[in-house]
């Protein structure tokens, strides 16, 4: 498969281009399944997961875990800067580490597990099945595009790369 249609991975504006010409780990070579067609592909797969699993499945998981991590990091900051109405009544002035323990004991974390699990079953499982059955759905694309980034392919590729790189932090 030709990798010429995949977007390049820029570090920042005029940064060094990464991609097909780069060996992520010198001496190991580039894995065969990482052909540069996915956004953010730098050929890093030292354990050979791309040889064992579908690359779209792996990318879907990477995007999903990156999104959850970014939301969690934002939540850690926001909960220390702003007190939501009713929060102090339920949890007192608990900071980040103490708050988790109180939420587990009170049952709030179990509710999160149930509701987020249902959302995953309703939306995530059908999306993965559709992707693995050969549809043209891109990993992480749920059709939610309020800024209309998908209208311009360059803007879309840049936003996808930004999301991927921030999720990898």
Image (cartoon, rainbow, N blue to C red):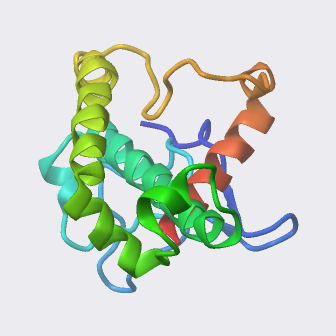
Q: Is residue 123 left or right of residue 24?
A: left
Where is residue 48, by image quadrant?
bottom left
Visible residue check, residue 24: no
Q: Is residue 161 left or right of residue 109?
A: right
Q: Is residue 65 left or right of residue 118?
A: right
> Which quarter of the rendered picture does the N terminus lie within?
top left
Looking at the picture, does residue 41 appear above or below residue 25? above
Q: Residue at x 23, y 16 (%)?
A: 133
* x and y, in percent, of residue 3 in the image: 53, 43
Where is residue 144, by image quadrant?
top right
> Is 159 or 41 nearer to us in this picture?
159
> Is 130 or 109 nearer to us in this picture?
109
Q: Residue at x 69, y 63 (%)?
A: 82
Which residue sits furthest right?
Answer: 14
Visible residue check, residue 135: yes
Which residue sits furthest front?
Answer: 89
> Is 129 or 3 nearer to us in this picture?
129
Q: Residue at x 56, y 47 (%)?
A: 39
* x and y, in percent, of residue 2 in the image: 49, 38
Q: Is residue 95 left or right of residue 7?
A: left
* x and y, in percent, of residue 169 in the image: 53, 72
Which residue sits furthest left?
Answer: 52
* x and y, in percent, of residue 89 in the image: 50, 58
> Is 25 or 127 nearer to us in this picture?
127
Looking at the picture, does residue 67 appear above or below residue 128? below
Q: Residue at x 54, y 62 (%)?
A: 88
Say how many tags the image has: 0
């Amino acid at each position: 498969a030709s990798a010429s249609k995949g977007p390049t991975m820029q570090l920042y504006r005029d940064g060094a281009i990464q991609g097909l010409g780069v060996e992520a780990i010198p001496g190991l070579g580039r894995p065969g399944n990482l052909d540069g067609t996915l956004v953010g592909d730098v050929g890093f797969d030292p354990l050979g997961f791309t040889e064992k699993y579908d690359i779209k499945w792996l990318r879907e998981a990477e995007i999903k875990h990156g999104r959850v991590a970014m939301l969690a990091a934002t939540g850690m900051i926001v909960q220390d800067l702003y007190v939501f109405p009713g929060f102090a009544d339920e949890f007192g002035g608990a900071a980040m580490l103490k708050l988790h323990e109180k939420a587990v004991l009170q049952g709030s974390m179990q509710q999160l597990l149930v509701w987020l699990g249902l959302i995953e079953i309703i939306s995530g499982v059908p999306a993965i099945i559709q992707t693995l059955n050969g549809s043209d759905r891109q990993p992480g694309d749920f059709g939610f595009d309020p800024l209309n980034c998908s209208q311009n392919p360059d803007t879309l590729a840049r936003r996808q790369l930004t999301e991927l790189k921030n999720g990898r932090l």
